Amino acid sequence: MYPVICTWYGALTFAQLTKDKPLMQRLIAQFDAQFTPAFEDFLLSKQHVDYSVSGAIPLEIYISSKNAKYLSTGVTFADHQWESPLPDGLSRETRYWIDDMYMITIVQVQAYRATGDKKYLDRAAQEMTAYLDKLQQPNGLFYHAPDAPFFWGRGNGWVAAGMTELLRSLPANDRYRARIMTSYEKMMKTLLALQAPDGMWRQLLDHPEAWEESSSTGMFTFAMITGVKNGWLDEKSYGRAARKGWLALVNHLDTNADITDVCEGTGRKNDLNYYLQRKRNTGDLHGQAPILWCASALLR
């Protein structure tokens, strides 16, 4: 479910930024057709990050259309994510996989953008900080999970994209901002050093023998484009890296506009060869989504 949602979100932001009304109308019509009350109930019943992320879509539609029915749907997902929170105030969907640092936080950030209610931003920032404290390593990168000590490319991409989306909305005086920005900058510094000469990043970031992978490259490029344009990152060094990443992504598009060399869906596992031998897909939405995020970031 979540790869569809993440691609849909990118398509919506791209349509809005390019003022492509026919595309926006098609995307909204698709939502209206698919998100029936029964389907919404099904998603909510899962109480899982991979399904809860769906709330980002109606919230983005509301931001563009100001139609209150989409706000109601989106806020339902955001509030459901925090029903019966853990004793430390975190969402009960917390599981400390790095994927969650996008899946959980994007819904809350979108709810803040749609409503202006800071409780949603506080939830996202508190959740992000807890994950940073638990999973970020001294080199700035992240293990897939506490029991999977590998710097998996797309997993780290989810972190980079999640921090980037959150930092876009966190006020300068927010109590969590300095902590999150420090982690973001530390991660970007290491990623800069690990980028391949052709602009790509690898399936396992610190293994030169690992194959070059598109979805992680898209997510890191999105994070760097946004960082440069917002003044968080040095324009000379990171602007060059972002440009190389974008051109590398474009070069991985085939004649159908499907991106190649996308890692298949990957659960955590304490096994090096498991990550090195993951299947390469073409047109996988895990890879299509970050291309749209990058395009949107370039247009902002």
Image (cartoon, grey):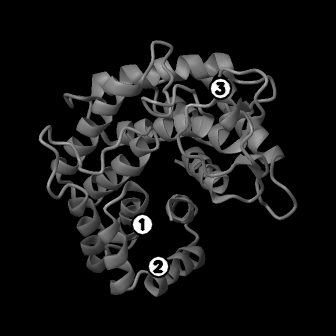
Q: Is residue 200 left or right of residue 61?
A: right
Mark 2 and mark 3: Cα distance apart in space: 36 Å
Residue pointed to by mark 2: 31
Q: Amino acid at mark 1?
A: Ile
Asked if the residues shown at circle 2 and circle 3 are in contact, with their CB atoms under 8 angstroms apart, the answer is no
Asked if the residues shown at circle 2 and circle 1 are in contact, with their CB atoms under 8 angstroms apart, the answer is yes
Q: Nearer the viewer, mark 1 or mark 3?
A: 3
Q: Residue at x 60, y 45 (%)?
A: 298
Q: Residue at x 56, y 80 (%)?
A: 26
Q: Position of residue 279 (x, y in %)?
A: 75, 48
Q: Residue at x 65, y 16 (%)?
A: 193
Residue pointed to by mark 1: 57
- Pick whichever of labels 1 and 3 is earlier in the sequence: 1
Q: Position of residue 260 (x, y in %)?
A: 79, 51
Q: In the image, which disc is placed on residue 32?
A: none
- Pick whichever of labels 2 and 1 is earlier in the sequence: 2
Mark 2 and mark 1: Cα distance apart in space: 8 Å
Secondary structure beneath dot 2 equals helix
The answer to whether any part of residue 56 appears in the image is yes
Residue pointed to by mark 3: 205
Q: Amino acid at mark 2?
A: Phe
Q: Is residue 29 above or below residue 261?
A: below
Work out whether residue 61 or residue 259 is closer to the camera in this orientation and state it. 259
Work out whether residue 82 or residue 192 is closer to the camera in this orientation and state it. 82
